[in-house]
Image (spheres, rainbow, N blue to C red):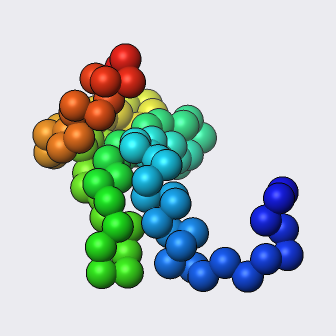
Amino acid sequence: MVLMGMEIPIEAVQRQIASGIDIIIHLGRMRDKTRKVLEILEITGYEEGRIQMHTLYEFQEKGSSHGKVRGSLVKKEELQKKEKLLAAGY
């Protein structure tokens, strides 16, 4: 609210987002109307004009049963900034 009306470069905003968010959990609605965690991403920084992130877990569908979507989260990569989260008590 303090900065309302101020012209802030988009790069500065993106850098603030990259430094203030560690993990993104992407929820989505499936075709059976249930919500599932589809992806868990780690924000690793800001480089070359882009917020850098990598996928930790990704939902992989394993078919459907009686109209219900079935599947599970599959680990894709290791957490890169583990020390930061451990220092914060996670």
Q: Residue at x 84, y 57 (%)?
A: 1
Q: Position of residue 36 (x, y in %)?
A: 47, 36
**Left or right side of 38 for 84:** left
Q: Nearer the viewer, residue 78 or 10?
A: 10
Residue furthest to the top in view is 89
Q: Position of residue 50 (x, y in %)?
A: 37, 75
Is residue 14 visible in the rendered structure shown here? yes
Q: Residue at x 32, y 29 (%)?
A: 85
Q: Position of residue 8 (x, y in %)?
A: 67, 78
Q: Is residue 4 above or below residue 29?
A: below
Q: Nearer the viewer, residue 64 or 44?
A: 44
**On the image, which quarter does residue 23 sit in?**
top left
Q: Nearer the viewer, residue 16 or 26?
A: 16
Is residue 32 visible in the rendered structure shown here? no
Q: Position of residue 49 (x, y in %)?
A: 38, 81
Q: Residue at x 35, y 20 (%)?
A: 90
Q: Is residue 54 above or below residue 88?
A: below
**Left or right side of 28 for 78:** left
**Left or right side of 57 for 89:** right
Q: Residue at x 60, y 82 (%)?
A: 9
Q: How many marks?
A: 0
Q: Is residue 11 above or below residue 76?
A: below
